[in-house]
Image (cartoon, grey):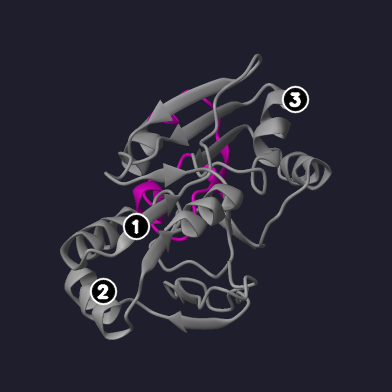
Amino acid sequence: LAGQPELEVVSSLAGRVRTPVMPVGEARVGGFGGPDGLAEWLRAEHVDAVVDATHPFAANITDSAVSACGRTGVALLVLRRPGWHPGPGDDWHLVPTLAAAATTLEGLGERVFLTTGRSGLAAFAALDRYWFLIRTVDPPDPPLPNRSRVLLDRGPFTVDGEREVFLAHRIQVLVTKDSGGAMTAAKLVVARELGLPVVVQARPPAPDARTVATVEDAMSWLAAL
């Protein structure tokens, strides 16, 4: 979006990653202070439109955008990549929360590849019978499982690279979130190849806002405003 000369774009990053990949153009890092703070900023900056391109699990940020745009009359579009769906050969176990994912591990395997991000790892901290490979972009905060190793890495990931990780660490079960998109889907391909179970946290409810799946659709929406 920032590459379009007819648009004045400000990208807002939540600040969850210590060294984010910065977008082109003007950017700000950090929250607004909830929907009230965001509404105040939208008015002060005379914003015409908001494109919420946050992670599918960043429900609080999306809720703030819906509320702030609703009270200020600013047009809102949610850009949300489609979720994943199990295919032939997949052994998926859908759960609503990471706490449910922790209990679902029973009987699935004892060497777990945990790719759910830095938040919510406390749900697995007391599971001493399992060994966890925890992959995050930045070092996670405690509590962590006693039997675990942290792998710091950032996508996109390839099928060959993911296969090497699975085999090197003798992974028996994958735990992930339905973040969607191709950048992190290689691990699902490898789990299918190896016949391994996958515990998938389902997405939170969709926001009450117009939603598109591609940047091209978002650009068309902006052009029509």
Q: Is residue 30 visible?
A: yes
| Residue 50 in the image, given as x and y percentages of width and height | 38, 64
- Under circle 1, the secondary element is strand
Residue 38: numbered disc = 2
C-alpha distance separating marks 1 and 3: 40 Å
- Under circle 2, the secondary element is helix
Foreground disc of the pair 2, 1: 1
Residue 40 is left or right of residue 18, and the answer is left
Q: Which residues are magenta?
A: 104-132
Which is more N-terminal, label 3 or label 1?
1
| Residue 211 in the image, given as x and y percentages of width and height | 41, 44
Q: At label 1, which amino acid type do we have?
A: Leu
Q: At label 3, which amino acid type do we have?
A: Glu
The residue identified by callout 1 is: 76
Count of marks placed on residues? 3
| Residue 104 in the image, given as x and y percentages of width and height | 40, 29
Q: Residue at x 67, y 30 (%)?
A: 191
Which quadrant: the C terminus?
A: bottom left
The residue identified by callout 3 is: 193
Which quadrant: the N terminus?
A: bottom right
In the depicted structure, whether residue 168 falls above or below residue 61:
above
**Marks 3 and 1: in contact by CB < 8 Å?**
no
Residue 37: numbered disc = none
